[in-house]
Amino acid sequence: MAKGFTLTCYPWVYKAKYQEGNSWKEVYEEKPHKTPSEEEALSEEERTLLIEQRNSHPDLPLVNYTTQYGMGCFEGAKAFPQKDGSLKLFRPDENARRMASSMEGLMMPVFPAEKLLKAMLETVRKNADIGFAPKYDSAWEKDNFLSGNAVYLRPFTYSEPGIGINLTKAPWVIIISTPVGAYFSPGNASATTTEMVRATPKGTGWIKCDSNYVIPTLAKNRAVADGFMEAIFLDANEHKYVEEGSSCNIFFLQKNGTLVTPELGDTILPGITRKSLIVLAKEKGLKVEERPIAIEEAMSESVEAFVTGTAAGLTYLDSITHKGKKAVFGDGKMGEVSTDLLHTLKGIQYGAVEDKHGWMFEA
C-alpha cells in the first residue's frame, strides 16, 4: 500500500510559462527513469538518487515571489485505477476552475481552466503509458477502498525571479504526479480544537494558496504531538464556530438526522469532495444544512463526524476534545451514515458504483 504522500514523482512533468500577450508556452518534460520493475530492483541509494533527479528542475528560479513570500497556489486531484485497467480522474474540471479562481484571487495571470484540465489528463496518460500507474486490487473493496492506491496530481504555480514583495506577473504552471495511499494513519481518529487561527475575514482563506497551509501544518503537528489525529479550527472573531480541519472540510451528523457543515465564506476553502458529498447525502434522503455551527453544538448534538478532502477522502472522527472536554461520537467507530457515504464516494471513484453525475474523467 502506498503511503499518504511521497516524493516519488512520476517521470512526465507538465510545465506552462506565461508569455507576453496573454499566452502560455507549454511543454511535457520526461525526467530520468527506468521501468517501474527496474526501479524497484534498485538499491535504496540508487533509487534515492534517481528520485532526486526527477525532482530537480534547474530551469526554475530559486529566489522568487513563491519561495520568498508564498505567493503561489496549487491544486490536488486524484486519478483512480479502474477494474478495466483504465485510470479516471475525479472531478478534475472542478480543480481546474478552482485553480483559475485562486490565480485570479492572487492577482496573477489566470491559466485557462480548460487548458489545465487537458494537461492533467495528458500527464496521467503519459505516465501510465510507460507503466507509472497503480493497478486495481479487488482487495480494496473489503474496506471501502480505504486501503486503495491512486495517482495524486499536484498542479501548482511558480513565480518568475524576484526578491522584493510583489505580484507574480509571469508565472509557471506545473503539474507533477506521485503514487498516493491513505492520508491519515489508521488507529487514531481523535481530533482537538486549536487556538490558532487558520484564516481571517477579508483574507485569503477561500484561496488554495501556499501561505494558507503554514498555520494548519503547525496546528496539526501540535495536535499529533498531543496524541490526536487532527486539529480543528474555530472562527477568528469569536473562536466559537467550527470552520475546518487542518487541511479538510468537516461535517457533523446530528441526533435529528441532519447533516451539518459550515457554510462557505471567505475563510473556508470550497472543497470539491465537500461539494460532492453534499450531493450524495441529499440523494440518500438526508437533510443537509450549510450554516454556522458552534463547537458546543457540534459536540453535544452530533452522533457522527467526519472530515473530507482530496487527500482525506472521507475520514471519520471518533471524538473531539475542546478545552479539556471530550465528546465521543456514537460508539467511537465509523457510523452508518459516514460508512454509507464513504462506500458511495469511493465506489464512484474506483468504478464500483455507477457514476450518475459524470464526475469521472478517463485519462
Image: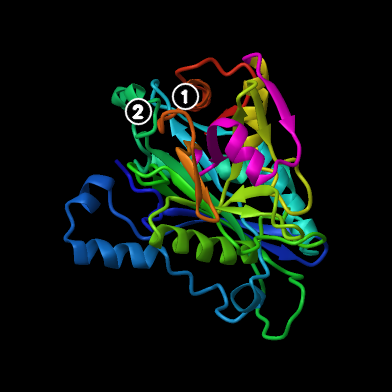
Q: Which class describes the residues within 10 Å of circle 1: few (<14), some (14-19), or many (20+)?
A: some
Residue 74 colored in magenta in the image: no
Q: Indicate which disc residue 201 carries.
A: none
Determine if residue 89 is in view.
Answer: yes
Above or below residue 83? Residue 165 is: below
- In the image: residue 342, left or right of residue 187: right
Can you give x and y, in whole percent of width and height, for residue 329 in the image? 49, 33
Q: In 3D space, how far apart are the residues under numbered discs 1 and 2 (Cα atoms)?
A: 21 Å
The residue shown at (48%, 36%) is 316
**What residue is drawn where x is 56% and y is 60%?**
216
- Which residue in the protein does label 1 denote? 339
Q: Position of residue 179 (x, y in %)?
A: 39, 46
Q: Which residue is mark 2?
A: 136
**Residue at the image point whose x is 40% and y is 55% from the top:** 9
Instruction: Kindly give the residue lying farthest to the bottom in the view shown.
Output: 164
Question: Which residues fall within the magenta stretch?
Answer: 284-313
Looking at numbered disc 2 in the image, what kind of residue is underneath it? Answer: Tyr
Quadrant housing the N terminus: top left
Where is residue 186 shown, x and y percent of the image?
A: 34, 42
Choose between 67 and 315: the one closer to the eye: 315
**Furthest residue in direction front, as rendered:** 325
Secondary element at image label 1: helix
Question: Is residue 305 shown in magenta?
Answer: yes
Left or right, 234 with reference to 306: right
- In the structure shown, which secondary structural element does the residue marked by tag 2 occupy? loop
In this orientation, does residue 91 appear?
A: no
Which residue is at a point 39% across and 33% down the rendered structure image? 146
Q: Amino acid at mark 1?
A: Thr
Quadrant housing residue 196: bottom right
Quarter of the image holding residue 55?
A: bottom left
Is 141 drawn above or below residue 77 in the view shown? above
